[in-house]
Image (spheres, rainbow, N blue to C red):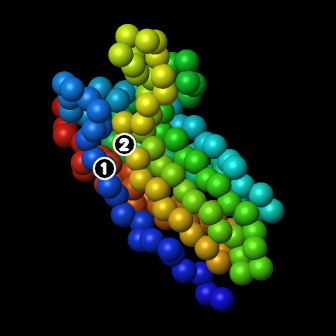
Amino acid sequence: MPARLATALTLAFAAPALAQEQTPLTETNISPMTVIVTDMTEDDCWTDPGAAADIARAELGKTTIELVETEAEAETAFVIAVQARRAEAGCYGSVRLAVGAMIDWKDNGEVAGTLQAVSNIFEGRETVDEFVADGLAQSIPALADYLPDT
């Protein structure tokens, strides 16, 4: 069975719905940023998660977002989360690309929050490597276009 996408990889960057006073996201106020990879795959569906992190860093390096190596140095994170397993027709699962940060939630302390995200599902692939790489190559430039220059 040929690989097919269950949904088109499109961006749905929307303003956070719960914020009362919204500060627009900019490349400056989401800096410094680190890249985090969350691999929830099985059955060799994702053979090179490190390559995805390298692609994300390279694409983010084309923006004015300041990149740092560790979470301790970062104000935000670009998260690549992949969940997949193999079936008879190939690997299936989901990919989520998100910009996250720790936020003060109603004076109850910091919680992890998602500032922007895009998700997609896939099926019928030998591995998800190319699917993730293509998603990063499309999504990060779109994020940079979405964010106003500062």
Where is the C terminus found, in terms of image quarters? top left
> In this picture, is 48 found above or below 107?
below
Quadrant of the drawing holding the N terminus = bottom right
Of 55 and 7, nearer the camera is 7
Q: Is residue 137 visible?
A: yes
- Position of residue 38 relative to residue 20, above or below, is below
Task: Tell me the crowding category of disc 1: few under 14, some 14 to 19, or many 20 or more residues within 10 angstroms, Cα based.
Answer: some
Discs 2, 1 touching: Cβ within 8 Å: yes
Q: Which percent across, then down, holds residue 91?
A: 69, 70
Indicate whether 44 appears above or below 4. above
Going from N to C along the chain, the mark reached first, 2 or 1, is 1
* Residue 86, x across and y down, in percent: 75, 69
Spot occupied by residue 118 in the image (x, y as percentages of width and height): 42, 53
Does residue 74 lie above or below 120 as drawn? Answer: above
| Mark 2 surroundings: few (<14), some (14-19) or many (≥20) residues within 10 A | some
Label 1 sits on residue: 13
Q: Nearer the viewer, residue 132 or 95?
A: 95
What is the secondary structure assignment of the residue under circle 1? loop
Q: Is residue 48 visible?
A: no
Indicate the secondary structure of the residue bearing disc 2. strand
Gap in Å between the C-alphas at discs 2 and 1?
6 Å
Q: Amino acid at mark 2?
A: Gln
Q: Which residue is mark 2?
A: 116
